[in-house]
Amino acid sequence: MELDDLKQNWKKSTIKNNINTDIMELIQHKSYGPIAALKKEFRKQIILMLILPAFLLVTSVDDINLALTSILFWSYVFFCIGMAAFSWENYRMAARMEQMDGMVRSNLQQQVSLLEKRLQLKNLGLRVALLFFVILTEIVPYFQHYRMLDKWHSLSPLTRFGSYALLFIAQYFLGRKIMQRKFGNHINYLKRLLKDMD
């Protein structure tokens, strides 16, 4: 009787080890899987954030001196560099997760949790950045003159602040939706796979 119980326990543990190995292979696959998808999205963000300031500079080529002395331009450049650096750190974290093996599942779980928190922090950071740019848009015309901002400030304050409110609402809902589609779904999938390994 004890021998039969021992055989059953051994078969169950062998099956569980195989499942764990299969799940880890799926998680860590280089060309598909949740970590590969996360890395791809982080890579896209890095490239986009490095291209945007150059694009903005090219569009201002007719008055390059004004662009280079603009607080708006430099604020945007620093914002893009900060976003690229943040995405690079997240990319490196995902790359480290890809190299872990089944023996460090708890460590992988901690990394997934940390990545999830960092993405929530990023969402909050984007809202703060939007507020910063709105404030900058309101105070810059007192120091530097831009045709576009002068036209914007010729509108009534009710129109301007109503537009800002709509922008914040749109950023809140669209930002959450985009973040969920690009990152949240993959993180949730990783969490489900890790839970299946229990």
Image (cartoon, rainbow, N blue to C red):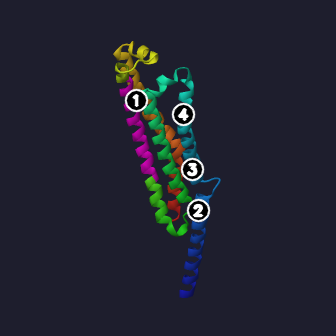
Q: How many numbered tags mark residues here?
A: 4
- Say which element carries label 4: helix
Residue identified by numbered label 3: 39
- Say which element carries label 3: helix
In x, y percent, where is residue 189?
A: 54, 53
Query: Relative to the observer, which residue lies in front, 81 or 180?
Result: 81
Query: Relative to the observer, which residue lies in front, 50 or 18?
Result: 50
- Say which element carries label 2: helix
Instruction: Find residue 133 and name its label.
Output: 1
Q: Nearer the viewer, mark 2 or mark 1?
A: 1
- In the orientation shown, which residue stands out farthest toward the front? 65
- The kind of residue tagged 3 is Lys
Q: Residue at x 55, y 83 (%)?
A: 6
Which stretch did the figure color magenta? 115-137
Instruction: Find residue 52 and name its label.
Output: 4
Distance (Cα) linking label 3 and label 1: 29 Å
**Residue 28 lies in quadrant:** bottom right
The mark nearer the N terminus, 3 or 1, is: 3
- The kind of residue tagged 4 is Leu
Q: Residue at x 54, y 64 (%)?
A: 100
Examine the structure image and report whether residue 79 is included in the region drawn in magenta. Answer: no
The mark nearer the N terminus, 2 or 1, is: 2
Residue identified by numbered label 2: 23
- The kind of residue tagged 2 is Ile
- On the question of residue 1 being in view, the answer is no
Is residue 192 shown above or below 75? below
Q: Residue at x 42, y 37 (%)?
A: 126
